[in-house]
Amino acid sequence: IFPTERIEKGRLGFGGGSPEGSKGASYAHLPVDEIDARLPCELREPPIFFIPKASRAALFEELRAAGRIPADLVIPYYILNGDLSPRDRAIYDALGAANIEIPFNQIVVHQATG
């Protein structure tokens, strides 16, 4: 999601710094009239792919240790090693190049249906 305030010289928020007061703000609940662009993921990739591959196994181990997931739960190879599609990876990397918080402000996760 690219809100109207993020549009700077037609760049849709790519590059440059973040706008004033946006630190930690989520765009997930913006009204439709405040959104300039929405780029849906055609492949409906799992949101876990936004976590770097190198950190995923450790995350699941922390969840096991905290009792938040069963100790015998087998995490599929695909979840541990999969990646975003080339298009989505390029968008994510371009947004993150300016500020690591920006991609997470602009991501909205929808429950898969069908």
Image: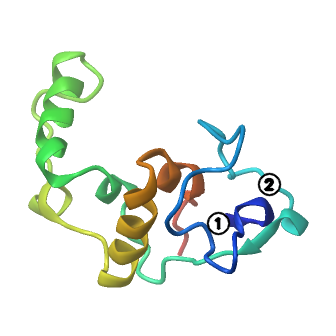
Please tell me in which quadrant of the rendered image residue 70 appears. top left
Q: Is residue 64 above or below residue 81?
A: above
Query: Percent x, y for residue 55?
Result: 17, 42
Q: What amino acid type should be assigned to the residue bearing mark 2?
A: Leu
Please tell me in which quadrant of the rendered image residue 24 appears. top right
Residue ID at (21%, 34%): 59
Asked if residue 6 lies left or right of residue 94, the reply is right
Residue ID at (55%, 69%): 113
Q: Depth check: 67 or 110 in front?
A: 110
Residue at numbered disc 2: 30
Give the position of the N terminus as an image quadrant.
Answer: bottom right
Residue ID at (36%, 62%): 46
Cα separation, mark 1 vs mark 2, equals 9 Å
Q: Depth check: 31 or 78 in front?
A: 31
Query: Percent x, y for residue 100?
Result: 41, 48
Asked if residue 76 lies left or right of residue 88, the reply is left
Crowd around label 2: few <14 · some 14–19 · many ≥20 (10 Å):
few
Query: Percent x, y for residue 35?
Result: 78, 68
Q: What amino acid type should be assigned to the residue bearing mark 1?
A: Ile
Q: Depth check: 12 or 80 in front?
A: 12
| Contact between labelled residues 2 and 1, with CB atoms less than 8 Å apart | yes
Residue at numbered disc 1: 1
Q: Is residue 113 above or below residue 59?
A: below
Q: What element carries label 2?
A: loop
